[in-house]
Amino acid sequence: MSDERLQDGWYVDERCTNCDVARQLAPGLIAEVEGRSAVLRQPRDRAEQELLHAAAHACPTRSIRPPGGRLDAGQDPFPMVLDDTVHLCGHNSTHTAGANSYLLRRPDGTAMMVDTPRWSDALAARFEKPGAVTDVLLTHRDHAAHGRRYADRFGARLWIHEGDLDTAPDADHVLRGTDPAEIAEGVIAYPLPGHTLGSVLYVADERYCFSGDSFYWSRTAQDIVVAETVTWYSITELADSLARTVDRLRFEWLLPGHGDRQRLPADDMARRLRRLAAHTRELRPRPIDFTAVRW
């Protein structure tokens, strides 16, 4: 059925790139059908309407459309509270392949931004309204777009690893090597080469893990997985990185750039990570294939 025939209800237009963002935010309402997102059914109540508005305002191509096709800015829920410390930024950018980004609130009332949403001065003002944003933490090269612009707007420090420095050569702080580094009280950067040479994950307060594209929660597998068919640098290096790092990691929230978020007890997360490290050791290089990613 064409988009035009569906405009009396919610629909997905032809710009969809099958990035999974909308499916994370409106499960059961939006799903993958023949290689793109599709609205499975119309919302039945206000709560389901809100899920679709969230999906629409996060979608990087603005492909999730309400009846009549015009989004209502008053229904924009972002930044969306995940808990009292982390907010989801929404407004995913086509320049970061539709990656998720986050605001990490700190005890002193300031915040850090992990990766970036699409650039907008109005959005920047919204993100810093609850408190100054002091740092913009980039997880790797694929998500570096808009980093300098947001950092300059906030008066914040921009961070990236030396392995991906060519995508943010004017970064204020450059992480080096593979040793963990405490970059602020309670916030530790763990270099994790594999997905890219300069991939980094950030762990805050032994509770939150911002994993970039190093690993994510798969709804299909109901477990933590690596994107083995979208590993730009080396799956072997990723296996080495996980083996070196997993026993140091402790967190409850898994907050990736792509793929789903999940909260589990820290001991459960630790067990799953050890299993993931062992499994990744068995993987071999594969051609890049976005269609084979297990969302």
Image (cartoon, rainbow, N blue to C red):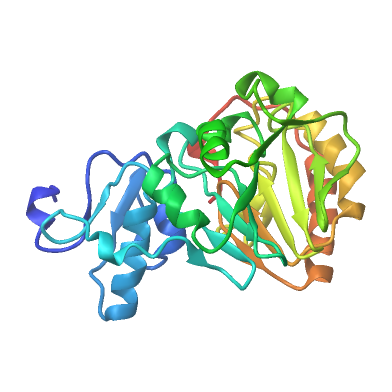
In the rendered structure, the answer to whether residue 289 lies left or right of residue 48 reads: right
In the rendered structure, the answer to whether residue 44 lies left or right of residue 91 reads: left
Residue 153 in sight in this render: yes
**Residue that appears at 60% across and 72% down:** 83
In terms of image quadrants, where is residue 247?
bottom right
Q: Residue lying farthest bottom?
A: 45
In terms of image quadrants, where is residue 107?
bottom right
In the rendered structure, the answer to whether residue 286 lies left or right of residue 90 reads: right
Residue 29 in sight in this render: no
In the rendered structure, the answer to whether residue 51 lies left or right of residue 137 reads: left
Count of labels shown? 0
Task: Judge by depth and name the residue closer to the eye, 253 or 283.
Answer: 253
Q: Is residue 41 above or below residue 69?
A: below
Q: Position of residue 33 (x, y in %)?
A: 33, 50
Q: Is residue 246 above or below residue 169?
A: below
**Residue that appears at 71% across and 71% down:** 264
In terms of image quadrants, where is residue 29?
bottom left
Task: Judge by depth and name the residue closer to the eye, 60 or 259.
Answer: 60
Q: Position of residue 25 (x, y in %)?
A: 43, 62
Q: Position of residue 92 (x, y in %)?
A: 44, 46
Q: Position of residue 106 (x, y in %)?
A: 70, 62
Task: Judge by depth and name the residue closer to the eye, 277 or 52.
Answer: 52
**Residue that appears at 34% across and 78% down:** 47
Q: Is residue 190 above or below residue 271?
A: above
**Residue that appears at 53% across and 31% down:** 289
